[in-house]
Image: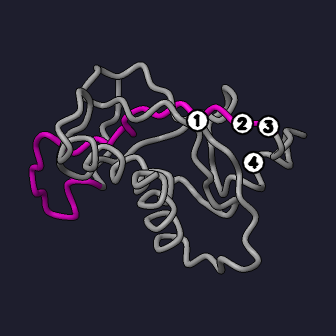
Amino acid sequence: EKVAALTLQVAQKGEMADESEEKKVLCRFVTKLPEAFSVTSGDLAIPASASRYGLSQTVNALLAAAASSGQEGGVEGKRVFDFLVEGELLRGNLNRHLEKRGLSVEKTVEIEYFFAIEPPEPSLDLPQPDWVSAVVAASR
């Protein structure tokens, strides 16, 4: 399928995978986000070395492909996603995550994606001289 081939290319480019020796994991992406952010519900073969960044690129490629083909879901633009693999937050690569939890790569792994939370930005920055930050008030 065209979308699956696109997904593998994006994930491999992002992770610099060696296709001849790379282990693949069958994945199904699910989400609780609005319909515009849902991707195809079919199983996809993702490199086991894929990290959060590679999976995020894959979801963005699937969303862009859905938007360009006029399917119901799909949006343009890059978003940063976080992932729950079988209910646990993914940190590191997919293979390590599955091995640590004793999950098999032989069955389809359900990966839920959602928007990553951006770090807060200070709303107001008041520049102060260095000596002001060193002042300590004494209570009487």
Q: Amino acid at mark 1?
A: Arg
Nearer the observer: mark 4 or 1; the answer is 1
Q: Is 135 left or right of 58, judged from the image as shown? A: left
**Amino acid beneath label 3:** Lys
Which x, y percent locates residue 97? 75, 48
Q: Nearer the viewer, mark 3 or mark 4?
A: 3
The kind of residue tagged 2 is Thr
Residue 74, located in which quarter of the rendered image? top left
Q: Are marks 3 and 1 in contact (CB under 8 Å)?
A: no
As drawn, is 114 to the left or to the right of 89? Answer: left
Q: Which residue is mark 4?
A: 97
- The local secondary structure at tag 2 comes to loop
**Residue 27, relative to residue 24: is it above or below?**
above
Q: CA distance from mark 4 to mark 2?
A: 15 Å
* Marks 3 and 2 close (CB-CB < 8 Å): yes
The x and y percentages for residue 96 are 78, 55
Image-quadrant location for residue 22 = bottom right
Please report the residue visible at 72 percent of the width from the left and 36 percent of the height from the top.
Answer: 108
Q: Which residue is mark 2?
A: 108
Q: Earlier in the sequence, mark 2 or mark 1?
A: 1
Helix, strand or loop status at disc 4: helix
Label 2: how many Cα within 10 Å (few below 14, some 14–19, many 20+): some
* Residue 69 place in picture, x, y as percent: 20, 44
In the image, farthest residue toward the front: 1
- Which type of secondary structure does the marked residue at label 3 adopt? loop
Viewer-nearest residue: 12 or 100: 12
Q: Is residue 135 above or below residue 18?
A: above
The answer to the question of whether label 4 and label 1 lie on touching residues, with beta carbons closer than 8 A, is no
